[in-house]
Image: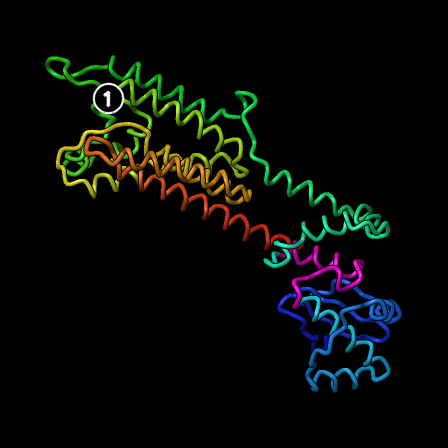
Amino acid sequence: MQSLIQINKYISIDLEGRNIIIYILKEKFKVYSLSKINEIIHKAKFLKNINIDNNIIKDILKRNPKNVDTFISFYKLLNFWAMNRYNTNIIDYQISLPILRKLYQIGDRQAEKLFHDEILKNLWGGDPSVIKFLMREKYHDYLLLESYKRRVNLVYTAKDIKFTLFICILMIGLYIFLPLFRFGDNFEFSLVDVFELNKSKIYNDLELWRLFTPIITHRYRITLVVNGSLILVFGSLFEVNNVFHLRNYFLVYILSGVIGNIFYLLLNPNPEIFASGASGTIFGIMGAFIIILLSKKRYFWAIIIFLISGLFLFVSDYPTIGYYAHLFGFITGIVINSLVHSLNSLKHRKTIKKS
């Protein structure tokens, strides 16, 4: 392959015989005849005097001296289009829209921001030929997909929130049955004492399971009612809007609670800490749900949930409440779901490039 003429880091073009070839990421994308390109140049209203490297001109002259003028004019037009945020008013829709769609698919950030707006603009532009082209090539499907991606789903059936209901039932069951299993000389201890967060037991006896078990264990009815209600609300919203596998929910739930407990132990100077409850996990779920709202571009609701989380954090800054568990559980939920979304997006882009 001869050296390609670069438009930007995604687009390049070349002249072969009586055809101009457009490349995306150096892979052949579209071939247009010079007659078609001449028609497009003739219609263009935005053809500007853009400087072109003399070495490029010499290279094209060697390859095809007869058609160099057409090639240079198209280069300038395509360059001007790329410099002006892929405005489809600049170049004929039969060229600009397919390129824009491909750029959107491979993850060009600029194209991702503009693609749907450009489809809407052309659908409502009133030009029957453009509308017919968009419908025939199923560009409107991208609008439907975008609408679906931005929709915040609500709970309609219990099947939608199976994991959340399982957690709530498990917490209620443990609250009822753990106190029934008692031990000690005078039966003064119950399994709740074995399951709760206990700083001295973890530090001195290395009972590390106590970092995990408190996130499903409650000693007091009021904490069970409050935490159970919050998990039912925010856990349900997170579950029905979580586009990834259920293990992402499980990961957020476990790690938010455990990491919150770790920081609660590390930053609390009190050598005797006894605690139980899923509040750190709840804050992790709320943080993860904020990331989902941001990914759906529901910024208003993301701010609302953030303010609610901030209010809960503020009122939990009290010696007898696990403030650090709440704070670091919240941060953990945000970090985990941000990483999951980023990794999934990267994987998706690599799949598109290979296809």
Q: Is residue 353 left or right of residue 194?
A: right
Q: Quadrant of the N terminus?
A: bottom right
Q: Residue at x 20, y 15 (%)?
A: 182
Residue with the most extreme left position:
185
Q: Is residue 283 left or right of residue 37?
A: left
Q: Which residue, given by chain and number where applicable, does mark 1 sit on?
A: 192
Q: Position of residue 118 (x, y in %)?
A: 70, 53
Closer to us: 227 or 42: 42
Q: 10 Å neighbourhood of mark 1: few (<14), some, or many (≥20)? A: many
Q: Look at the image and say whether residue 178 sits in the magenta stretch.
A: no
Residue with the most extreme right position:
35
Amino acid carrying label 1: it is Val
Closer to us: 336 or 210: 336
Closer to us: 271 or 174: 271
Q: Residue at x 45, y 48 (%)?
A: 339
Q: Look at the image and say whether residue 89 sits in the magenta stretch.
A: yes
**What kind of secondary structure does the magenta stretch mostly adopt?**
helix
State whether residue 66 is above or below residue 309. below
Magenta residues, start to end: 83-106
